[in-house]
Structures are given as C-alpha cells and as structure tokens.
Image: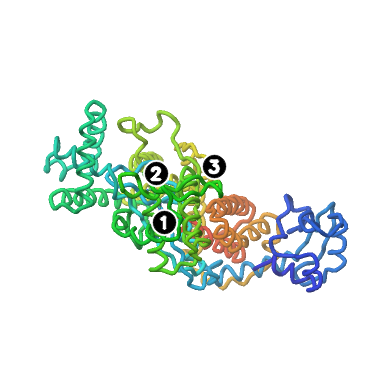
C-alpha cells in the first residue's frame, strides 16, 4: 500500500503545484504520538517567503480527508498525519498475502539494461578481504535491479593483464615445476610471486626478465602464453569456489586482457580531437580545468594503462548492451580514476558518459590478530568465510534436533550470511572493522538474527499446518488492534519504497536496516500476540506471521543471503 501516495492525493493539484509536493516530502515521525506519517515543512518553504508553521497551516486547511487519513495536526513546522488503523492494517495484510514474495516487485525498470562491474578481481592472487564489499554490494544491487524489472548484466572485469603476470612467469621458469602447479594452483602461483618480489629486491635484472615475459604474453608467444593461460585457469577455478559459496554468478568475464588490443580506436580519436597531449614522453588528457589532474593514456614506453583499457571496455559495453546505466563498484581509493575516465568520455561527446556511475565504499578490515593473514598479506576471503562457518558450526552443533546434513547446511548459510551482511549493514562509505562475534550474535543486529526470525515464522506456520487447518485468513482487525501489530504492519509496508530508495541511492543498507527493524518488530509482536491458544489457531495473527515470512525471505534473497526454514 503506497501510503505516501495516498496522503499526497488528499491535496488538490493547485496546492501540490504551489508547494511542489512530492512523496519524498513525507517522512516517518520519531514516535507514534506524532502520527503515522509527517511532512516536515522546512524544505518546502525554500523560496516561498513563509515560515514552516505557516506552510503547515495552509496545507492542513487544504487537506481533503480520505478513508485512510483521519486526522492531521500541525506541530511546529510539521504537518502530522493520523491514519485509520483498521483500513491500513487490513489492506496491507491482504496485499502482502496476495503478492507473497513478490510484494514490492515491479517493472519500474521496464527491462532497461544496467551493467554492473563488480568483484573484478585481479587474478593469480587470492581473493582477499578487500574484495568482499565490491562482490557483495555489486551482487545485492544486481538483485535489487532485477527485482525492479531491469535487465542486468553482471560483469567480472577480471584483472588478467599487466606486469605481475610477467613476474609470475619469470618466477615459474626459474623455480617452479608443473607438478606442484597442478596440485596447488593459486597457492603455488602466489608463493612464486612472493619469492619473485623478495628476489627482485636483490637482483633488479629479474624485473627486466619479467618485462620481457609480459611482452611475450602480449604478443601471444606460444610457450609463455600457454603458461599464462594455465595461471588464469587455476585462478578462475579458485575464485569460482568462493562465488559458489556466495551464490553469485556473472554474465560476462571480459577482463582487462580482452581490451589490450582494442584501444587504438579510442586513442586515435583522442588524438584527432586534440585531447591528447605530451607529458614527459607519456600521453595524457589534461583534466586540470575540471580539477581532475591528468588522465594517463599511454606510458612513455608506449604501453597502455588502466584508464585506457577502461575507456575501451566502456565503449564496448555500450556497443554491446546500449545500457541505460553502467555501474562500477570499487573502493573509494579509485574515485579519481573513475572521475577521470568518465570525464574523458564526456569530452569525446559520448552521450552515455552521464549514465556512468562509480559506486564506492569504505574500507573493510579485520581487527588485528583476529584471523591470521598469510605471509603478511591481506586476510584471505576464503579463510574468513571458513572461520565464520566453523564458528557457526560450534553453535549449531549444540542443537540435537538437527541431522548432520542440516547442521552443515545451516552453518554454511549462517556463517556466509554473517560475513556478507557485515559488508552491507551500514552505509557503504563507512569503514567496517569486521568482528566475527558481533556478526554471529543471534540477538544482535545481524543476519543470523534475521535468519532466525524467518525460521521462527516458518516453524509457527509449520505448527499451524500440522494442526490440519486450511487457512482462509478471515481477518478480524480486533484481534490485532494493538500497537505492536500496527508497528509491525507499518514496517512491513515500507518494503517496496525501501527497495526503490536502495536502487536510487545504490545503497543496500537501506534494505538491511529495514529487515532488522522488521525482525525486531516481529519478535515484539509475537511475544504480545498469541497465535496458538490451546491448539486453537488465531488466523488473523497467523496471517501477520506469514506476511512477515514472505518479506524477510525476499529481503534476505535481495541481500544475497539464504533464508533458512529451520535452524
Ligand atoms: N581489478 C581492479 C582492482 O582489483 C578493479 C576493477 C574495477 N573495474 C574497472 N572497470 N576498473 O582494483
């Protein structure tokens, strides 16, 4: 039920126009005594030369009451709205029960295409803690856009290009052997790479060899290229195990190397349009007048750069998908890079330049000493996930009502969920210090808490079913006419608008927060409203449980977390 829209409809067109009223002007007051919704008039007054109180008074005298809005009240610069609880409650419930998990689903996206570049790991290295946020935020946004009827293209723009690969090949040729490579995969390549870095400190000629080997990869020299492909394959196999755990898949794996021989056109165009200038032998686009420094296009030795490949990749994506929007999810440290290459495309008069968005987030780290990082490198994602799964297992093992398989499944899903949720619990720009005990607290603001609440709903419904009833949900308002019910129902009803806001602000935490609010409201509701009375089922109250279950399930699924029926 779109209550904000229904409230707005109580004003006539003239008033709406005069005060520029939009749904976003309507908010939730801090407490229920101030009404169900309110309109703070501070932002409305802007150029009207009237005080917020005056505006609120004008609005209230021009308000046509409806079945839904029973009363308005002016308090300070606020116009507060009081709703008819019965109508609101029963309508929302009926709507959720009818749409089930599709409550909030829509076609606002009209099948327009959104490209999402996320995860985009550099290969032949471990996926480490720094890759968690991009992977999880990107996947969540993708789920949200799909739910809203967009056509999404998930792109893993793998880092499969550059001198590190020359170093690995050099190290392998010097110290490596095939048997170990086949047996240990990425672990082995990483060890070789680390050894290379240590040795190259002492012997600079190794770096020269690495450059030569990289040049051979570029020229697809048979022997070197085969080895390179082997490294890439081992590495992709490794990261696929993580994506599998996270239940994430991609539509495209076109990475940096794919564009290594497709940059000429765009570089030539830059040259032709007089945008390319010389800077100590390198070629740059001077963006200083936009406060964006210099975008490096070619190094003095002629080799290409990260930005050059991104320009080519962006053009390729537009040609392939004609995207409505194209998003890039990385940490905030790459902000300048994206601003630069977006600007270059704008200078090249690409209309699609304004459809590009860099979605950046803060640092995700571990408190010192919690999970040992290997060889002083950043903590490895696989280790963190396993650690969390094992910790969960210790808790779940205490439950004797579960089979071994159930225990495994539940531990994996809760353990992984806890890590995922930590990356999308707060505003994405905030830094996160991941605390496993906090993340696994079943009573905290965590995914186990939401999963537990969902499972609780499922078990209530199961019990009701076992009592052999066929539910018609003949709903009677007086059975749920208390504050805890009303609070829960109103919170459930925020689901659709929250998904829309999350999609507009690229902010998954809006959904995470709402699911926490719903879970809290549900647990309060359930302790105040008995569903079972001597094996008699109160159908109206059960309906509320079912509505909650649908929304928690869909919400978790949008976040990329499994909703368990039992735990
Ligand atoms: N591979 C890069 C890194 O790990 C991230 C790539 C982001 N996407 C892009 N189109 N530049 O830092």
Give the mark nearest the N terminus, 2 or 1.
Answer: 1
Is 334 situated above or below 10?
above
Instruction: Name the residue at 34% across, 44% down.
Output: 300
Q: How far apart, in angstroms, are the residues tagged by discs 1 and 3?
A: 21 Å
The N terminus - image quarter: bottom right
Percent position (x, y) of residue 370? 40, 31
Is 21 situated above or below 530?
below
Asked whether the viewer can see residue 564, the reply is no
**Neighbour class for label 3 at 10 Å: few (<14), some, many (≥20)?**
few
> Which of label 1 and label 3 is nearer to you?
1
Is 32 situated above or below 163?
below
Give the mark nearest the N terminus, 1 or 3.
Answer: 1
Q: Which residue is mark 1?
A: 117
Q: How far apart, in angstroms, are the residues tagged by discs 3 and 2?
A: 31 Å
Residue 161 located left or right of residue 466: left
Percent position (x, y) of residue 247? 37, 56
Instruction: Name the residue at 31% across, 42% down.
Output: 126
Question: Is ligand 1 less than 8 Å from the beta carbon at label 3?
Answer: no
**Neighbour class for label 1 at 10 Å: few (<14), some, many (≥20)?**
many
Instruction: Name the residue at 35% across, 31% down.
Output: 372
Provide the secondary structure element on which disc 3 rests.
Answer: loop
Residue 291 located left or right of residue 19: left
Name the quadrant containing residue 97: bottom right
Q: Which residue is mark 3?
A: 430
> Which of label 2 and label 1 is nearer to you?
1
Question: Is ligand 1 less than 8 Å from the beta carbon at label 1?
Answer: yes
Label 1–label 3 contact, CB within 8 A: no
Give the mark nearest the N terminus, 3 or 2.
Answer: 2
Q: Which residue is mark 2?
A: 396
Provide the secondary structure element on which disc 2 rests.
Answer: helix
């Amino acid at each position: 039920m779109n209550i904000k829209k229904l409230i707005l409809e109580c004003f006539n067109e003239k008033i709406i126009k005069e005060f520029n009223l939009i749904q976003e002007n309507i908010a939730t007051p801090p407490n229920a005594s101030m009404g169900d919704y309110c309109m703070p008039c501070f932002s409305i007054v802007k150029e009207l030369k009237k005080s917020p109180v005056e505006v609120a008074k004008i609005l209230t005298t021009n308000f046509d009451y409806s079945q839904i809005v029973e009363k308005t009240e002016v308090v300070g610069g606020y116009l507060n709205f009081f709703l008819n609880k019965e109508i609101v409650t029963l309508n929302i419930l009926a709507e959720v029960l009818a749409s089930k998990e599709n409550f909030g689903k829509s076609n606002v996206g009209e099948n327009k295409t959104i490209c999402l570049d996320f995860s985009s790991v550099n290969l032949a290295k471990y996926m480490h803690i720094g890759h968690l946020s991009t992977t999880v935020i990107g996947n969540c946004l993708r789920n949200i856009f799909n739910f809203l009827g967009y056509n999404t293209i998930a792109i893993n723009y793998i880092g499969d290009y550059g001198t590190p690969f020359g170093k690995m090949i050099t190290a392998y040729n010097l110290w490596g052997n095939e048997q170990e490579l086949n047996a240990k995969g990425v672990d082995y390549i990483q060890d070789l790479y680390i050894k290379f870095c240590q040795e190259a400190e002492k012997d600079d000629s190794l770096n020269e060899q690495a450059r030569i080997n990289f040049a051979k990869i570029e020229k697809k020299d048979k022997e070197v290229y085969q080895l390179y492909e082997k490294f890439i394959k081992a590495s992709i196999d490794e990261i696929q195990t993580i994506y599998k755990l996270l239940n994430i898949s991609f539509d495209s794996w076109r990475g940096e190397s794919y564009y290594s021989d497709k940059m000429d056109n765009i570089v030539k165009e830059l040259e032709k349009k007089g945008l390319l200038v010389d800077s100590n032998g390198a070629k740059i686009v001077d963006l200083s007048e936009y406060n964006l420094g210099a975008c490096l296009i070619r190094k003095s030795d002629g080799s290409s750069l990260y930005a050059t490949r991104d320009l080519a990749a962006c053009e390729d994506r537009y040609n392939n998908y004609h995207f409505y929007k194209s998003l890039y999810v990385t940490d905030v440290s790459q902000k300048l890079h994206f601003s630069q290459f977006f600007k270059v495309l704008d200078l090249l008069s690409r209309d699609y330049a304004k459809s590009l968005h860099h979605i950046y987030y803060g640092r995700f780290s571990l408190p010192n000493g919690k999970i040992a990082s290997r060889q002083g490198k950043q903590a490895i994602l696989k280790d963190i996930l396993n650690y969390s799964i094992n910790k969960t297992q210790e808790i779940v093992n205490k439950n004797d009502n579960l089979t071994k398989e159930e225990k495994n499944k539940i531990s994996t899903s809760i353990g992984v969920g806890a890590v995922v949720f930590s990356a999308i619990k707060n505003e994405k720009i905030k830094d996160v210090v991941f605390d496993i005990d906090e993340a696994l607290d079943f009573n905290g603001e965590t995914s186990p808490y939401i999963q537990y609440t969902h499972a609780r709903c499922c078990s209530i419904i199961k019990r009701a079913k076992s009592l052999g009833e066929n539910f018609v949900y003949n709903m009677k308002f007086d059975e749920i006419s208390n504050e805890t019910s009303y609070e829960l129902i109103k919170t459930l009803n925020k689901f659709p608008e929250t998904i829309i806001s999350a999609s507009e602000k690229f902010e998954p935490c809006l959904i995470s927060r709402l699911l926490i609010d719903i879970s809290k409201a549900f647990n309060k509701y359930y302790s105040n409203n008995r569903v079972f009375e001597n094996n008699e089922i109160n159908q109206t109250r059960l309906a509320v449980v079912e509505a909650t279950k649908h929304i928690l399930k869909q919400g978790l699924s949008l976040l990329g977390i499994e909703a368990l029926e039992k735990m």
